[in-house]
Image: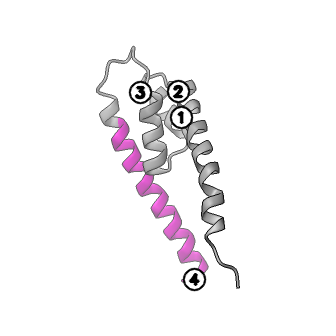
Amino acid sequence: MKQDNYYEFKIECGKKCYFRGGSLLKTIFTKPKDIPVSGEDCMKIFNTYCLRIENIVVLCFSHGYDVDKEGFAKLYEEQENRMKSVKPLIHSSVNYY
């Protein structure tokens, strides 16, 4: 694959992820505006569609919603700790020749 095509491909993939994440947010936007978007919902969007929390916050604010950033940060930290505990298992099972 030529380098120009590669970057075009990456941009198209990013657009698809962005719009899919946005459609998930639209389902969240049916909730009352006085209830912030939960950390669990933000984590689901983050993990599923690779949308960064900054993008999620901007989308929510543009539709009049607050975001539970503390809840997201707590869930993100828990996920990082789970990943740190798994890394040694992954690396110990690799055979180097």
Tell me which numbered mark, 2 or 3, is placed earlier along the sequence: 3
Tell me which numbered mark, 4 or 1, is placed earlier along the sequence: 4
Please report the bounds of the magenta region as a residue range: 1-25
Residue that appears at 45% across and 30% down: 60
Cα distance between the residues tagged 4 and 2: 42 Å
Residue that appears at 62% across and 43% down: 81
Cα distance between the residues tagged 1 and 2: 6 Å
| Label 2 neighbour load within 10 Å: few <14, some 14-19, many 20+ | some
Disc 2 target residue: 71
Tell me which numbered mark, 4 or 2, is placed earlier along the sequence: 4
| Camera-side mark, 4 or 1 | 1
Q: Is residue 4 magenta?
A: yes
Inspect the image, locate mark 4, and give the three-letter code of the amino acid beneath it.
Answer: Lys
Disc 4 target residue: 2
Quadrant in the picture for the C terminus: bottom right
CB under 8 Å between callouts 1 and 3? no
8 vs 36, nearest the viewer: 36
Disc 1 target residue: 75
Tell me which numbered mark, 1 or 3, is placed earlier along the sequence: 3
CB under 8 Å between callouts 4 and 2? no
Element under label 4?
Answer: loop
Give the percent coordinates (x, y) of residue 37: 43, 26
Inspect the image, locate mark 1, and give the three-letter code of the amino acid beneath it.
Answer: Leu
Disc 3 target residue: 63
